[in-house]
Image (cartoon, helix red, strand yellow):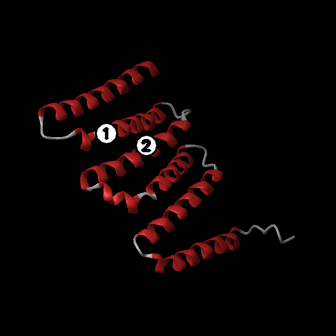
């Protein structure tokens, strides 16, 4: 059964790659705009590989990272690479998305949320600075801090310093 699914998936990937090459050969579309399809196809293949066999949880991280970065590359290839000077924090968000996918796809291990949150926050800070929205950064810090404090209060757990 798994062999049939693998052949099916590999066949779809070959069809997509073949269509891309046909577009380049027989149209005005340039490979300089379509090359992000290749890492995108691999990323989608990895995510689909996870859905074929849920034991392949490790497929989610590289799959989500490749999909995220490929979408960034598509945007820059079409709209101009000068945008990369402001959008580079997406490279930080990509593994954050992978950790979140592993959290929801796996046994909901809360240990995956900590690196996702840290990377997500770092990426947000750099995006905020790049787009000059850093005036809102203190508000975000207050909101995150309040969330952490309130979640501790309402969880009913005692902190390490208590008792």
**Residue depicted at 84% across the width and 72% down the height:** 162
Q: Quadrant of residue 7?
A: top left
Numbered label attached to residue 66 = 2
Location of mark 1 (residue) = 37
- Residue 1 appears in view: no
- Residue 84 appears in view: yes
**Residue depicted at 36% across the width and 25% down the height:** 10
Query: Compared with residue 85, is residue 103 higher up or lower down, i.e. above or below?
Result: above
Distance CA(mark 2)–CA(mark 1): 10 Å
Q: Nearer the viewer, residue 20 or 13?
A: 20
Q: Nearer the viewer, residue 160 or 28?
A: 28
Numbered label attached to residue 110 = none
Residue 123: horizontal and vertical position, in percent?
Answer: 50, 61
Marker count (numbered): 2
Q: Quadrant of residue 40?
A: top left
Q: Nearer the viewer, residue 35 or 6?
A: 35
* Mark 2 surroundings within 10 Å by alpha-carbon count, few (fewer than 14), some (14 through 19), many (20 or more): many
Query: Compared with residue 110, is residue 46 higher up or lower down, i.e. above or below?
Result: above
Q: Quadrant of residue 18?
A: top left
Q: Is residue 18 left or right of residue 144?
A: left
* Mark 1 surroundings within 10 Å by alpha-carbon count, few (fewer than 14), some (14 through 19), many (20 or more): some
Q: Is residue 13 left or right of residue 21?
A: right
**Residue depicted at 25% across the width and 44% down the height:** 33
Q: Is residue 137 left or right of residue 33?
A: right
Residue 129: horizontal and vertical position, in percent?
Answer: 46, 71
């Amino acid at each position: 059964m798994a062999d049939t699914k693998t052949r099916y998936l590999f066949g779809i990937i070959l069809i997509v790659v073949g269509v891309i090459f046909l577009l380049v050969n027989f149209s005005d579309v340039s490979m300089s705009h379509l090359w992000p399809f290749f890492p995108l196809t691999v990323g989608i293949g990895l995510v689909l590989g996870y859905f074929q066999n849920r034991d392949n949880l490790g497929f989610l991280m590289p799959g989500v990272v490749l999909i995220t970065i490929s979408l960034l590359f598509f945007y820059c290839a079409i709209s101009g690479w000068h945008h990369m000077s402001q959008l580079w924090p997406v490279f930080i968000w990509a593994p954050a998305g992978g950790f979140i996918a592993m959290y929801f796809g796996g046994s909901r291990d809360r240990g995956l949320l900590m690196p996702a949150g840290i990377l997500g926050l770092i990426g947000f800070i750099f995006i905020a600075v790049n787009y000059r929205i850093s005036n809102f950064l203190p508000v975000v810090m207050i909101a995150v801090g309040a969330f952490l404090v309130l979640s501790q209060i309402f969880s009913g757990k005692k902190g390490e310093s208590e008792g």
